[in-house]
Amino acid sequence: MLAARTGALQATKRVLPQATRSLSVRTLAAASTRVSFAPVLPALTRSTPLRQFSASCRRADEELVKVPSMAESITEGTLKQWLKQKGDFVEADEEVATIETDKIDVAVNAPKAGVLTDLLAAEEDTVTVGQDLFKLDTSASKPEGGAAAPKEESQPKEEKKDEQPKKEESQPQKSQEANPEPKSEYRKPDSSQPAPKPVEQSKRDSSASQEQQQPAPGKFSRNETKVKISRMRARIAERLKEAQNTAASLTTFNEIDMSALMAFRAKYKDQVMKEHGIKLGFMSAFVKASTVAMKELPAVNASIVGEGNSAEIVYRDYVDVSVAVSTPKGLVTPVLRNAESYDFVGIEREIAALGKKARDGKLTLEDMTGGSFTISNGGVFGSLFGTPILNTPQTAVLGMHATKDKPWVDSNGNIVVRPIMVVALTYDHRLLDGREAVTFLVRVKQLIEDPALFALHCA
């Protein structure tokens, strides 16, 4: 009995470790299932932030371009045109957009080469200095050209599809030709159609329809079109109204015999063109005459600054002449600085350069800023007589007009035909008295009528 119990106990000891090991394997397997696979799903769901992080790395090469500073007095403008679109590649310093201001159009250039990824403003929007304008991906390279467009490959397939319905449409025609209907059926009158009208009635109906189609005599189009006023035109209107409300404007006139100046120009224009490549016109003579007269009458070149008892008069030892130039967008007045230091050829060269920049829309704010005296030549448009408006805060503006042949009494009392130009000087009577204004204009007249006097006033 004791031996039997001892053998059973030993057998139990041999089986128990195996069962324990088997239980531990199953338990560990189940535990590993719960421990190792349960965290897998959270790990996968947390991969999205990693993708966002990689995108932010690409944005590190994305540059945000802002509205540039334009001038101290200009803080905003109108986005007139996007010259490039989203997805376009631009070179460094290439023009991307144009902003219209009160004075000039400002070009916005790309600071670096890259691809436009986003446009942050629409055309005709008001944008301010420092505002975000567009995004530029500077890591993008310039696309290679010459790749075949995919649209060209798909065109032959579309043409083949279009050929099938044509064949189907032609089949009924063949069947109709194969089984034509008797001609007698076509000759039978259709009872559903109305009876033909008499000839006289049809003529009356046709004439009535023609009268309805033709517009009645004396009627014209009365359509109206509204266009938003440009910033430049609005600024011009504001400045002109300001001049009328601020200055005590008065205009004095005189007539100038242009014979001597025209003879001077005819004699030397070919030589000037050959040596300098510049056309010799009348503007240089009037600019030079004005600067000479201003040395004798400095109040014409002065201006009033401030209001009331705190106002001051600013006198200048230089003459910055604003030359009025007409452009498609309006009248602009680029400045010829230190005009007193130029000779005839130099004045013509500078005026030609400023005029070209104005017509091409390339004027800068530096070209437009300042000016102490303005000359406007309405004669190029055929103006015979007019009163120019002051370009505040300037004190005077000289208006030139067209030269026309008129009867003239010469120094000997004879009536002769001479080319005459009417000139006008509008001035601010708050600073400039009538005596000074008239004296200034007479002095200009004397110099123009005798160009040899310029030799006595060389710069």
Image (tube, rainbow, N blue to C red):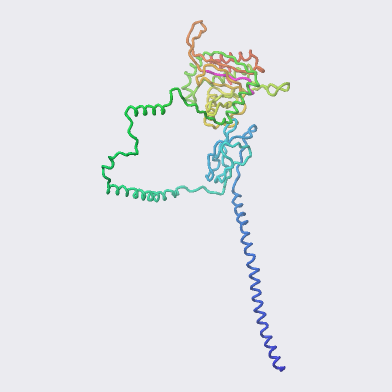
Give the answer, above or below, for where 228 lies relative to 400.
below
Quadrant in which the C terminus appears: top right
Residue 21 in the figure: left or right of residue 253: right
Quarter of the figure with the N terminus: bottom right
Q: Quadrant of residue 52?
A: bottom right
Residue extending furthest front?
191
Between 317 and 401, the residue placed more toward the observer is: 401
How far across and how far down the image is residue 146, in percent? Answer: 45, 48
Q: Nearer the viewer, residue 42 or 215?
A: 215
Asked if residue 111 lies left or right of residue 159, the reply is right
Residue 430 position within the rendered picture, expressed as x and y whole percent measured from the top left: 67, 17
Q: Which residue sits at x=43%, y=23%?
A: 217
Magenta-colored span: 392-401
Nearest the camera: 329 or 210?
210
- x and y percentages locating residue 348 in the rendered image: 53, 24
Compared to residue 346, the image places residue 170 above or below, namely below
Q: How many marks?
A: 0
